[in-house]
Image (cartoon, rainbow, N blue to C red):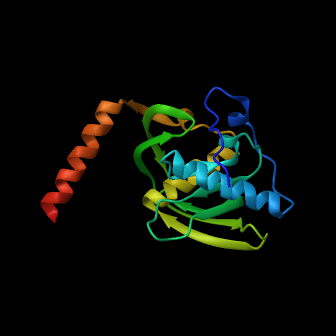
């Protein structure tokens, strides 16, 4: 496994409609392992292949403590409902944050690293992270969906307030 360089905006690969994966081999496994290691090293919760310079339909979401990462190869959105606005950031846009509206309940169909298909339902933050990464595979950047930009200071204050509320409830 190796840590790869995160592709930063502006770079054409980030706006590329990625190619479907048709070969499920050791190279794909290496890409997935490298992407996961790169994401963890960069303190991200998701990463898509274009963010490491590969224009293929591969993405990972991993923020659930003690659970396996969600590896998505050739993912397809098969159900979506509801809407929620929340703040997002992106490894390819360091220091950029903004409010983005996304579906808050989804179901996807995707392939595992061995090519077998699976379905996954997700809600709230997990759904948001999956949709963000799936957008990367279509060359759609989160900045095109931001309705209001948020500064680092505003984000830090929101996090501080949320932590205080959680402490009061405990």
**How many numbered marks have been drawn onto this rendered protein structure?**
0
The residue shown at (55%, 38%) is 142
Tell me the quarter of the picture where residue 11 sits.
top right
- Relative placement, left or right, of 159 versus 97 is left
Q: Quadrant of the N terminus?
A: bottom right
- Relative placement, left or right, of 62 versus 24 is left
- Relative placement, left or right, of 67 versus 166 is right
Q: Is residue 78 visible?
A: no
Give the x, y percent position of residue 109: 68, 67
The residue shown at (43%, 35%) is 97
Query: Furthest residue to the front?
Result: 1
The residue shown at (29%, 38%) is 156
Give the x, y percent position of residue 162: 24, 50
Give the x, y percent position of residue 54: 75, 43
Q: Is residue 139 visible?
A: yes
Q: Quadrant of the C terminus?
A: bottom left
Relative to 55, residue 30 above or below: below
Nearer to us in this view, 124 or 65: 65
Give the x, y percent position of residue 74: 74, 58
Nearer to us in this view, 83 or 52: 52
Nearer to us in this view, 126 or 167: 167
Query: Furthest residue to the top?
Result: 10
Query: Furthest residue to the right?
Result: 23
Tell me the quarter of the picture where residue 58 sits.
bottom right
The residue shown at (67%, 53%) is 34
């Amino acid at each position: 496994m190796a840590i790869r360089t995160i592709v930063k905006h502006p770079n054409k690969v980030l706006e590329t409609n990625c190619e479907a994966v048709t070969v499920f081999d050791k190279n794909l496994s290496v890409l997935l392992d490298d992407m996961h290691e790169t994401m963890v090293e960069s303190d991200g919760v998701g990463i898509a292949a274009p963010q490491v310079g590969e224009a293929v339909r591969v993405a990972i979401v991993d923020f659930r403590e003690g659970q396996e990462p969600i590896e998505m190869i050739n993912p397809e959105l098969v159900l979506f409902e509801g809407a929620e606005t929340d703040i997002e950031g992106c490894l390819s846009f360091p220091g950029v944050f903004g409010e983005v509206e996304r579906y808050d309940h989804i179901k996807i169909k995707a392939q595992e690293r061995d090519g077998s298909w699976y379905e996954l339902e997700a809600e709230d933050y997990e759904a948001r992270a999956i949709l963000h990464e799936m957008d990367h595979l279509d060359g759609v950047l989160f900045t095109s969906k931001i309705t209001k930009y948020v500064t680092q200071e505003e984000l830090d204050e929101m996090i501080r307030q949320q932590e205080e509320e959680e402490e009061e409830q405990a």
